[in-house]
Image (cartoon, rainbow, N blue to C red):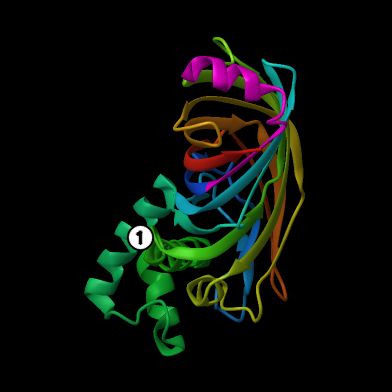
Amino acid sequence: MHAGLLAGNAQAQTYTIKLGGAYIDPRATSGDLEGTITTGFSPAPVVPLSEGNRLEVRPQSTLVFSIERAIGDHWGVELFLGIPPTHDVKLRASEIVKAGAARAALVKASLGSDAFTNPAKASAAITAVGGTANYLSLRVADNVNHYDGTTVARVKQTAPTLFLNYKLLAVSSALRPYLGVGLNYTSFKISATQAGVDLYTDGPVRISSTDSIGLAFQAGVNYKLDKNWLLSAAWATAAVKNEFTIRTNSTEQNASYRFHPSVFTLTAGYQF
């Protein structure tokens, strides 16, 4: 009798609304930052940034919402939205930077902890490391390494996604797995933290980013509690790529992301 009631109400229940939580693992580390960086040394204020320095986006949780319109017993079109999460962005210094910082530590052990920040010690430090080029390289490495693993920026992402879903099993089943394919649009708003500003030592830090459009996929399962209410668990991903530029008063750096985030959701739904 219960199965018959579910089947009888299937055609009337055109819409499903879901509300719940999501854990977003971006799995996103940028390509190498390319461009210039400040030295803090007035005779040569800007130098090229060494290879291998990257930015890593950290996981975050948020609230999500979706609305789906049924197309028959097995198909549905779902718009997936959420409160835009703000992710921490950490600097991952290169091995070149770490090696330079280790050499800089030896110089500071000899000349003092301010060997690369005290103008009065610049001449002695340049002599100790074998020339101005080496001095600048170690000075920059010492500064950049100080921020390794530090949150230097935050990115707020807005990522509406439209899915075409296919539900397995009969409409009368309480448990219904589903698969979906669709299109994702992601917009990024990136801002530097105070640590990011301090890293560049060159006035305000301005970060611009392109948006992304890519394919999206999801797999999940609905469990119907009664004729209207259900619980749902799902995993989703999308092809996301963007380019960003970091500018200060005298420097510019460019890099890009290409990643496939994992989004795990647990929601409650209402059908009508």
| Residue numbers of the magenta segment | 1-19
| Residue lying at 47% horizontally and 56% vertically, measured from the top left | 91
For residue 66, which quarter of the picture? Answer: top right
Q: Residue 21: horizontal and vertical position, in percent?
A: 47, 49
Q: Residue furthest bottom?
A: 120
Of 215 and 122, which appears nearest the observer? Answer: 215
In this orientation, does residue 111 appear? yes
In this orientation, does residue 173 appear? no
Q: Is 85 in the magenta?
A: no
Of 55 and 261, which appears nearest the observer? Answer: 261
Q: Residue furthest front?
A: 1
Relative to 171, does residue 94 appear above or below in the rendering? below
Q: Quadrant of the C terminus?
A: top right
Q: Amino acid at mark 1?
A: Ala
For residue 84, which quarter of the picture? Answer: bottom right
| Residue lying at 72% horizontally and 31% vertically, measured from the top left | 14
Relative to 143, does residue 161 appear above or below in the rendering? above
Relative to 69, does residue 246 appear above or below in the rendering? below
| Residue lying at 44% horizontally and 51% vertically, measured from the top left | 92
Of 132 and 218, which appears nearest the observer? Answer: 218
Q: Residue furthest left?
A: 109
Circle 1 is placed at which residue position?
101
| Residue lying at 34% horizontally and 65% vertically, measured from the top left | 104
Q: Residues within 10 Å of mark 1 (few under 14, many from 20)?
A: many
Q: Residue 78: horizontal and vertical position, in percent?
A: 70, 34
Q: Secondary structure at mark 1?
A: helix
Q: Residue 160: horizontal and vertical position, in percent?
A: 71, 45
Q: Is 4 in the magenta?
A: yes
Of 168 and 147, which appears nearest the observer? Answer: 168
